[in-house]
Image: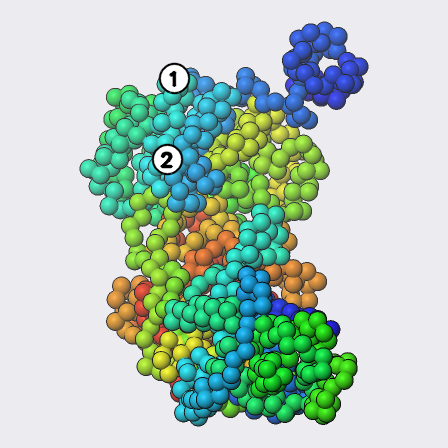
Amino acid sequence: MKDNKITRRSFVKKAGLGSAIIGAAAVTGGLAGCSSKKTEKVESGPLGPIPTDKMTYRTNPKTGEKVSLLGYGCMRIPSIDNTSTRESDSAIDQEMWNKLVDYAIEHGVTYFDTSPAYCKGQSEKATGIALSRHKREEYTIATKLSNFAPQTWSREESIKMYRNSFKELQVDYIDYYLLHSVGNGGMETFENRYLKNGMLDFLVKEREAGRIRNLGFSYHGDVSVFNYLLENHDKYKWDFVQIQMNYLDWKHANELNKRNQDAEYLYGELQKRGIPAVIMEPLLGGRLSNVHEHVAETLKRRKPQNSVASWAFRWVGSFPGVLTVLSGMTYMEHLQDNLRSYCPLEPVTEEDMEFLEETAQMLLKYPTIPCNDCKYCMPCPYGIDIPGNLLHFNKCINEGNMPSSKQDPEYRKARKAFLVGYARKLAPERMADHCVGCRHCVPHCPQNIDIPAQLQRVDQYYEKLMRGEEL
Amino acid sequence: MLRKIRVTLAVIFFILITLLFLDFTGLAHKYLGWMAKIQFLPAVLSLNVIIICALVLLTIVFGRIYCSVICPLGVMQDIFGWMGKKAKKNRYTYSKAKNWLRYTVLGIFILALVLGIASLVALLAPYSSYGRIAQNLLSPIYLWGNNALAYFAERADSYTFYHKDVWIRSLPTFIVAVASIVILFVLAFRNGRTYCNTICPVGTVLGTLSRFSIFRPAIDKSKCVNCSLCVKNCKASCIDIKNHKIDYSRCVVCGDCISKCKKDAISYTSKRYAENGINEGQEKRTANTEKVSEEGMGRRSFIATASVLAASAAVAKAQDKLTDGGFAPIVPKEVIKRETEIVPPGAVGLGHLTSHCTGCQLCVAACPNKVLRPSSDLMTLMQPRSSYESGFCRPECTKCSEVCPAGAIKKIGREEKSSIQIGHAVWDASLCLPMVDNVTCGNCGRHCPTGAIEMVAVDPDNEKGPQFPVVDESKCIGCGACEYVCPARPLSAIYVEGHQQHKLI
């Protein structure tokens, strides 16, 4: 790949046409002969354009179909106020969403992952609209039997949810169907949600009928459910399993939270059985792109042109058992950056692996809250903006605005950044001090964060800053 | 010359004192707090002898310079008058003094002061009147400007400017402010200082003194050609050109007549000189303004506040979670009807505040916690009252006590504040979530800064189950932290009842 590249600067130099930059792209064909026969394309910047034919694909061992290494997560669809639909109450920006989907397909993305719960229940419909403008064989779709509210757990309601997905997505078969977020709430919840009502058996039958091409589950939380499902692999024949995997969770998920499993174990178990892994949270909801300044520095020093996020994508994509890597891309620049990482994938080396493990250890030193902004905890019945509170706290840590004492020379500046930023981000009644500790959110958190305890931590820090007390 | 000095000083005073009402950072109060304290009525109410003497002396020596320079309401009227003169030149005429009206109003004012009819005092007092206008009408404009800057600062990732909520703290007070400015605009636009020379009690008192002022403008009959240009430009309508007399009880020493006179027939000079007949009206003068800043301690007055309240928002009942994301709607908190109203620490008690406060709104403007708002009660209209729907009386904040020019809210320190009991928390079991919805909460107990709330298990056999608050009234200071963070909406299940008299605990 490197050999094929030629920067604009060197091209101009070689061609000896200092003044001919403008229009160079248009006359590439004519000039190619006199510069270098390796030159295929004149690049538009130091990084060049994103190729449309270089996507790295993996093969689904069951169907033999090619799956793009980058999968599009449809849980952060853009809204008309230029944020994502999960953040605001505004409507989905369908026009922008169509554009993003078109761009992704044009650059080789085939896998789209949604759910009846995403974007306050609007994701399937919007994604259906965007995708139905393309040929059915150009894309594969993944959706889920979601499990947020117990009132949807009856067989009748579940089948209604399943059938509705076909309608919203405007399809007559679903490529990848998942039991959503198994493990949250442990075996008991799992049994109530998927076993006792016969839904799992129902879905297996649907697969036999061809309306579901691949059946799998997404896993968070209690590992006993994960183990149970794999032990029964012979019975259910899982075609794929969706797990959370990234260079921080590989060896340190359990360290961060006792209830979580290291991704190394999860991936290993899937490999043993030859089950392809679909990866979620490759960036930990942005925590591996919005890293502490010092971490960003070391990553940038190693590859100045690559984004911080690209390291996480390259790392996880380098595992051969990974079928696709999901990323919820709200903005075009995120999509483009991720496409760069996989068009094609430049696998990480042994040294890179070690380097990223060191990076993971460095990240662990900063006392950020492991919130991925997935918003499964929301809405809080008491109106608290849970991720808003936690992420502001993280932001201040990552930007170095978290003084450890009043004697810190940066105390005043950091105090202002924390307090002003906090008031900007949140309405007063959505701040952490209004958390009553009802713990409704706790079972919903895929990261098993003790949310009320963390909100109290934010609140106490806020109070100390307000009072100007020693921290 | 006299006019130029007067205009310059007036503009400086006016801008700075307005800044006192607009600034929300506390910086202005640090450097300019004295400007509120040299206002006549606050000085009288806080029994600030030094300032009263200085103002009396200033008036006896130089005339009613106070009205032209120090009083922001006077300067505001001059601005309206200046607009009036732009619309129509030489618009004023001479009129006789309406002494019966002036002294009647003064009498009513003193009576209201003595009887503690705070609302009437606040209505008539000029400084309070201006405070209301600044707080209710200018402050929103200032804040919107600030918020526009904050909007850009946020996008530039700067923390220099930050957003401030603009809200009407009390509708009656807002209406009074609008009415005041409309009336004053019409009066001043057409006839200059009508209000100052008929209604204003401070004007009447100072006018009585300035009859005997040592320095004063005087007309040199020998030079005067009776063109009456001075009369047409006298905003106090106090030049009687027929008799070549000036009514010094109404003259605010603005110097307009001196600069208008084409014959140099009017000069600012000493009384004796003037009485002996002036020859050449050359005068020397120094427009002195006293800069005395003294802590006020006080005496009596009124005003107040109350609240119709645009409250913030809050939470609904636990709603079914079907999908991810989004916010639960929040029901705004309603203002709780309290048996005894709450006044901030430093106010000593309801009586002390009522008798000392001029209702200038400086404390209301300064309160960063959305606690203070003007009273709507007829007797104490526009005086500050505390309420905790949108914030609570934070332990580190003593802003209102720092800014009060009238000694109605005495200056207190942080440590002192945490031991002043201004009320106590009352619990309403019928609204409390652990009691009605069987959920765990304890938010009031967690946020009590004095540890006055103990959480007790509803079911003694289940210590970890829902708990209800037990208030130790001897420790509670009435700050309202519990009320503010209480999840029950629109009425908090724990709220503060005020105390008539504050006490140290």
**SS under mark 2:** helix
Residue B153 lies, with reference to residue A161, above or below; the image says: below
Is A234 on the left or on the right of B165, as rendered? left
The picture places residue B147, in percent across and down from the top left corner, at 54, 56
**Label at residue A135:** 1
Evaluate whether residue A374 shows in this view.
Answer: yes
Q: Residue at x 30, y 58 (%)?
A: B317
- The quarter in which the N terminus of chain A is drawn is top right
**Amino acid type, mark 1:** Lys
Is A139 on the left or on the right of B265, as rendered? left
Task: Pinpoint the chain carrying mark 2.
Answer: A
Question: In front: B206, or B39?
Answer: B206
Q: Residue at x 33, y 73 (%)?
A: B336
Q: Which residue is mark 2?
A: A123
Whether marks 2 and 1 lie on the same chain:
yes
Question: In front: A277, or B334?
Answer: B334
The picture places residue B54, in percent across and down from the top left corner, at 65, 89
**SS under mark 1:** loop
